[in-house]
Amino acid sequence: MNFQPSKLDDESGRRDALVRLDAQAHSSEASFDHITGLLQLILDMEMVAINFITANKQISKARQGLDEKECPRDVAFCNIAIRKYVPLVIEDTLEDARLRDNPFVTGPPHLRCYVGAPLTTAEGYNLGTICAFGTQPREFTAREIAMVEKCAELVMDQLELRSQANRDFLTELYNRRSFVAALDSELARLRRSKGTATIAFLDLDHFKHVNDTFGHPAGDRVLKQFAVIVTSHCRENDLVARLGGEEFAVLLPDTDLDAAHVWAKRMGWQVANTRFDGDNEISLTVSVGLALVDDTQTGSETITKLADNALYEAKRQGRNCVVAA
């Protein structure tokens, strides 16, 4: 497949693709472990990993023979590999000027050889690599390199399939299942380390009128435009989901109710001052219900009910407002 070389320099687009495919978490799945295990058997090498490159780190999604879950981006071999669309092959790191002084070469685990194929999206963004390392110099055959490339294709197929299952088809936001899973994960994190987060439930006011007046295709365009507005007001680690219909939710980690209220008011102001769906110039407002997430909560069901009740109260108070549980 031919890609535009400009994609290799589009770091912002590359990081957006990482978020879209939810590739930045340490947690692995059996499918990724199977792929790394298979490649380890094929190559008969000590270490194999699926690594993703974030803004400043390398994160291992799956690994065989390695303990490190992450390392700084600037010392990662894979940070070199993502700069091209072809595999990076290093038969002896001590003979490579880019790597001979690397801390993973001069110190443990004293890496001496590497082969890695980029994990490339359909748009041409290299998210990371599937790669193998050894502690002795080694020559790689064309067949072995081709097998690494095939494993890279398998990884991307798995990422895309998982993304489709976790995303809302219309808006490309996360779906309800993904939101609940993220909320459960955030609760577990807060039980391990003190902190707070807030969830926001959002509902477009009188949205049925849009469908009845302008038709469902216009309604779909409005929902997609609204999703862009909400996402534009969120940070990289916030999670935005479409729960169904015109109902949306946002998980705001490390955010108390006061800060979430400011966020919601600012986002609501932009919605109220946007004319949706081009020439139709549809005016809309949004109601928001907020609920605090902390280590005292018993589970995601309790928190979502609090947010839902707060949203109901915002509707009862006349819509176009923010209510905290």
Image (tube, rainbow, N blue to C red):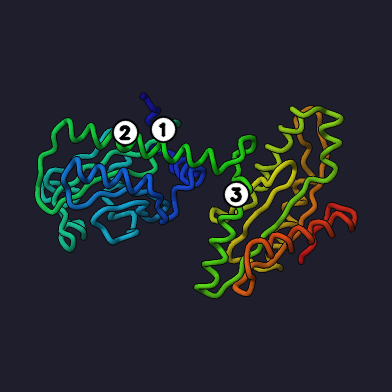
The structure residue drawn at horizontal position 66% and vertical position 68%, both measured from the top left corner, is 256
Residue 247 in the figure: left or right of residue 6: right
Image spot of residue 50 (x, y percent): 33, 47
* Disc 3 secondary structure class: helix
Question: Which quadrant would residue 219 be assigned to in this image?
Answer: top right
Give the numbered dot on residue 85. Answer: 2
* Disc 2 secondary structure class: loop
Give the numbered dot on residue 124. Answer: 1
Judge depth for marks 1 and 3 and give the one in front: 3
The disc labelled 2 sits on which kind of residue?
A: Tyr
The structure residue drawn at horizontal position 28% and vertical position 55%, both measured from the top left corner, is 75
The disc labelled 3 sits on which kind of residue?
A: Arg
- Do tag 1 and tag 2 residues touch (Cβ < 8 Å)? yes
Residue 290 in the figure: left or right of residue 195: right
Give the numbered dot on residue 177. Answer: 3
Image spot of residue 64 (x, y percent): 26, 53
Image spot of residue 45 (x, y percent): 17, 48
Neighbourhood count class around disc 1 (C-alpha, 10 Å): few under 14, some 14–19, many 20 upward? many
Neighbourhood count class around disc 3 (C-alpha, 10 Å): few under 14, some 14–19, many 20 upward? some
The structure residue drawn at horizontal position 64% and vertical position 35%, both measured from the top left corner, is 170
Compare residues 89 and 151 and report the one nearer the observer: 151
Q: Does label 3 or label 2 sit earlier along the sequence?
A: 2
Judge depth for marks 3 and 2 and give the one in front: 3
Separation of marks 1 and 2 at Cα, in angstroms: 9 Å
* Disc 1 secondary structure class: loop
